[in-house]
Amino acid sequence: MVLRGDQADTRRQAELASYAILDTPTEAEFDDIVRVASEVCGMPVSLISLLDGDRQWFKAETGFGQSETPLSQSICAYAVQQDDVFEIEDLTRDARTSDNPLVTGGPEVRFYAGAPLRTPDGVSLGALCVLDTKPNKLTASQAFVLRTLAHQVVTTLELRRSLQLRKEGDRRNKAILESAVDYAIVSMDLDGMVTSWSPGAERILGWSEAEMCGRPAHVFFAGEDVANGIPEQEMASALLHGRGADERWHLRKDGTLFWANGEMMPLRDEDGRHEGFLKILRDRTEQRNAAAKEQADAAFMRSVLASSADCIKVLDLDAKLTFMNEGGMAVMEVVDFNAVKGCPWPDFWVESGNADAQAAVWAALAGGTGHFQGAADTFKGTPKWWDVQVTPIRGQDGQPERLLVVSRDITSQRASERRVAESEKRWRGLFEGMREGFFLGELVRDGNGRAVDYRFVEINPAFARQSGLPLNSVGLTIRSFVPDIEQWLIDSYANVVDTGEPALFEIDVPGLQRWFEVRASKESGDRFSCLFLDVTDRKQNEVRRGAMIELGDRLRNTTDPIEISRAAADILGRTLDLSHAGYGTVDHDRETIVIEEGWTTPGIPGIGGLHGFRDYGTYIEDLKSGQAVVIGDVATDPRTAKDADALAAIQVRSLLNLPLMEHGRFVGMLYALKGTPYAWKPEEIIFANTIADRTRAALARIEAEERQRTLNLELSHRMKNMLAMVQSIATQTMRTASDLDTAKEVLAGRLVALSKSHDLLLGGSVSAAPVEVLIGSALQTHEDNPGRFKLEGPTFTVGARAAMSLSLILHELATNAAKYGALSTANGRVSITWQLRDVVGEPHCVLRWSEAGGPAVVPPTRTGFGSRLIGRGLAGNFGGEVDLSYPATGVVCTIDAPLRGLQAEDTPTPGH
């Protein structure tokens, strides 16, 4: 089928582009064809014309003197629409050409004959034509030659394109080898003797190729490995499994050892037979056989050119052989044409080839062109592959009267294509199996020639995995993925291209959150190749190590808990690139957290204040049990999905919460939050845990120092009170005793009771008990007569946690009363009453201490340690309130605390 109109023009231009023939210099093969056409046809002018858009360009010409003309002047434009030789005997008499400038003006062309240049896919590229300055007509033999030469033009174009594709494949493979400068590639024969030795091997191992070729490869293995048969084991593994891994110490020429990892693979010939081994170590450079490969390529090119002679045959309408040219007889190994003359031509083809030959004949009989490729033996049984085209030879009436068959021997070409495919497969396997990332890039420049971007020409799977880019990134630019990539990186690649000097540097790509070590080398034109090694883990480890050093320095130089929390939050937030980070104090029972001062990334509001855990999910029970809560996306995690909007309001999409436990209770939390979904890495969780542990240790150190200071003050205060108490007991005993022996006995008993009370308070052995029993035990030391104390109130149990604080308060009140108040006189009395009441739905206990009968009370001018101990005893630990008043009739102390706090069971640390 002959395509016409815009469709034909579009396909023609695409085909011409694939041949890369337009505007190329003259080539002898094409020049010879136009000279032959001119000589055989007896015409002064012959052209190979290619139609390109609005012009016709001449690949070869003789007698014309121009390289192109406008398409409007093209007579070949009519020839490409024909199936066979197109001929106009007198151009001045044909309406299509009579007003053509080539006819009406110089060179005053009068005759035109052209054979279309039709590709195997049926696309007419142009025509091979002859021109005369006088009316003329081709003979049948001249038309036959012109038709045959036109087919030869297409055959030459096909061959030329095949060689270009081979050359481009070789260039790409060479670029891959040359860019991997850190790999040593060594090939060996079946006995393990070195047959090739790359420059990278020389750089890494020290031996030159001349020194190593013909020597056993085990010379660069360590002596112990050689003794253990490691080289032989690798070759056996390569044969058995297709690949032998190698990661061990190797030996350099100078005797030093180095560690290398590599692989050994079997080498096979074209028939799949094992012929040796390929060993790849760290570096990879140009192979030593580059020169030999060039010679092989040249030999291959000569063999392809030598096989370009076509077998030209003529068939009658019954598809029987009537003619075969001498070249065809030679290539078909036919000694005497009479031996095959009259034989049905399709019968030379077998199986599917016979059907293809019949179809090609039918196509030509119908006035079209038949084309196929297939295998057929020569007359002597030599198997060959052929490219076959069958066209009609038309008679005077325009109908086919014979058939022209042109068979081109493509046996060598197919073998070459098979070798190219196998070579490409071999190198592609190496390219795609590399652990290091590799890409081939091309600079994108602005109007001033400055590089502003680069385009991916090719990438390997390792680079796609490292960078996170898809494998189909080829053809796209880096800025389409990372719009804000820094210009210095593009400038670095441009410098490699402009100077030809390779570069080695590290880059941080924020958009990909990766670090890479990059080795860049120049390729052709604006292209460059890059070998990438992902060093992200190493860089992140360095950052985390630096962060821990900074944390240690900052914690070492402060005793302020707020500054400790601030330092931990700041370092955690910056190191893990968080939106929020910090430490908060937790109320285990109310399930709330108070964040005094956290770290927040610039540009978003902070989250300080009081927060309820259940407002942000259902994971509070995990925290209470001491388990870390790690959530990658709060919108999809079942623990937070229902409250995702509340978390989004404070810029949180992923979270890492680490509970801080004390005596089995959830008392604090280190939080790390991100504004985007994120998969937390194990090393990041370990890092955050380390921050939490060091922060808690620093806070514990400060708390311990504070407890020690408080304990020292309390011990001093109690010693003073003890001496005062002993004095008071002695005074009261002597005042009421009837004789000295009685006084001695009573005084000894009271001192023993005082000692037991003191042991109770200091030892922290107070346990849960009814409130009246607890009060009575705390005041036993001071009960020198039955009427001293009046206790009144409902019964309830006081938990171990509150019992100690309440005992200390009562002991302190009684001690002060014995020194200055109602218990310092014989008639003094103390009333202790308590009652339960409801406060906003929560039961509270109100306990009142009231003194009477003692000296007139004067309010103190300063607050001593005992008064402070009373004031903070229940307020700090149980949310209670203590009020001390000093009416003249006697001291009054009122304690108001939640009942749940008084009944808590865990015991606080002694001294608190």
Image (cartoon, rainbow, N blue to C red):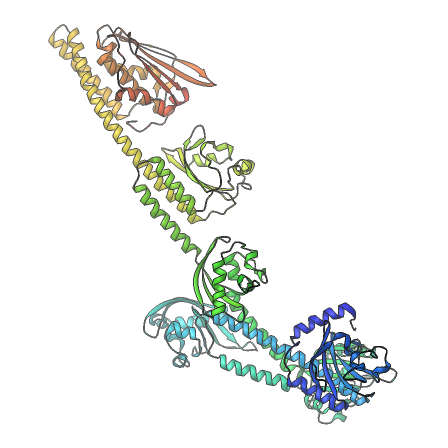
Decide: is 900 above or below 607: above
The location of residue 670, given as percent across then percent down, is: 41, 39
The location of residue 458, given as percent across then percent down, is: 55, 65
> Which corner quadrant holds the N terminus?
bottom right
Q: Nearer the viewer, residue 447 or 479?
A: 447
> Which corner quadrant holds the C terminus?
top left
**Looking at the image, which residue is at 42% across and 80% down?**
213
**Looking at the image, which residue is at 72% across and 70% down?**
11
**Looking at the image, which residue is at 39% across and 51% down?**
543
Q: Is residue 444 left or right of residue 245?
A: right
Q: Residue 181 is drawn in which quadrant?
A: bottom left
The location of residue 269, given as percent across then percent down, is: 54, 78
Decide: is 153 above or below 873: below
Decide: is 783 above or below 548: above
Q: Residue furthest front?
A: 105
- Res. 633 in view: yes
Q: Nearer the viewer, residue 335 or 550?
A: 550
- Res. 671 in view: no
The location of residue 7, given as percent across then percent down, is: 76, 68
**Looking at the image, which residue is at 64% across and 77% down?**
161
Q: Nearer the viewer, residue 490 or 393?
A: 490
- Number of callouts: 0
Q: Residue 165 is drawn in which quadrant?
A: bottom right
Decide: is 600 above or below 806: below
Q: Is residue 707 left or right of residue 543?
A: left
Q: Residue furthest left?
A: 740
